[in-house]
């Protein structure tokens, strides 16, 4: 699954976010037939946005789609999704959420599971390394991102 194009895109997005001076979290929304519908990264710093987390950015970049496009889709994300992003996945009936890692931050995984979304945690070392370094180098920005 770590070689899946959706997960690769999410990691690429996380690295791009870091290169832009932002939070290194990336995401990609993939249709049930394997097509990347949208991809994005956390843009809170770059756009001065309160809501453009990676998953929200991927949804935004997917454009306006019929409800059927989201059903059966998979959201790949490098970090466990926060409550806001969890809610967006549930709202659009995303079938599966694949998470790079959840050691740096544990989001709404239990809610996803309780509401019937398949939830897979890869425990990916590259994702953990990105977040650990970022949290060490930019603790104030990280705390702002998670609402602390």
Image: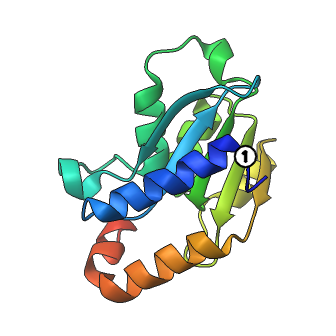
- Left or right: residue 82 compared with residue 74: left
Residue behind mark 1: 4
Q: Position of residue 20 (x, y in %)?
A: 26, 59
Q: Position of residue 48 (x, y in %)?
A: 18, 51
Choose top left, top right, bottom left or bottom right for residue 16.
bottom left
Q: Residue at x 26, y 81 (%)?
A: 140
Q: Residue at x 68, y 30 (%)?
A: 93
Q: Is residue 76 visible?
A: yes
Q: Position of residue 144 (x, y in %)?
A: 29, 70
Q: Residue at x 61, y 50 (%)?
A: 8
- Left or right: residue 79 compared with residue 54: right
Q: Position of residue 63 (x, y in %)?
A: 43, 20
Q: Is residue 31 above or below residue 119?
A: above
| SS of the residue under disc 1 | loop
Q: Is residue 83 above or below residue 87?
A: below
Residue sitting nearer the eye, 105 or 54: 54
Choose top left, top right, bottom left or bottom right for residue 100.
bottom right
- Left or right: residue 127 compared with residue 50: right
Q: Quadrant of the C terminus?
A: bottom left
Q: Residue at x 24, y 65 (%)?
A: 21
Residue projecting furthest to the left: 48
Residue projecting furthest to the top: 66
């Amino acid at each position: 699954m770590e070689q899946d194009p959706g997960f690769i895109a999410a990691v690429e997005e996380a690295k791009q976010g870091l290169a832009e001076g932002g939070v290194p979290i990336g995401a990609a929304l993939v249709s049930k037939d394997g097509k990347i519908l949208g991809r994005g990264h956390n843009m809170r710093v770059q756009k001065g946005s309160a809501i453009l987390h990676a998953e929200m950015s991927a949804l935004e970049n997917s454009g306006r789609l019929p409800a059927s496009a989201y059903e059966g889709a998979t959201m790949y994300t490098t970090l466990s999704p926060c409550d806001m992003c969890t809610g967006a996945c549930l709202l659009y009936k995303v079938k599966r959420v694949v998470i790079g890692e959840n050691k740096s931050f544990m989001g709404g995984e239990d809610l996803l599971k309780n509401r019937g979304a398949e939830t897979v945690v890869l425990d990916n070392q590259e994702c953990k390394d990105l977040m650990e370094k970022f949290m060490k180098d930019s603790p104030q920005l990280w705390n702002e991102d998670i609402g602390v």
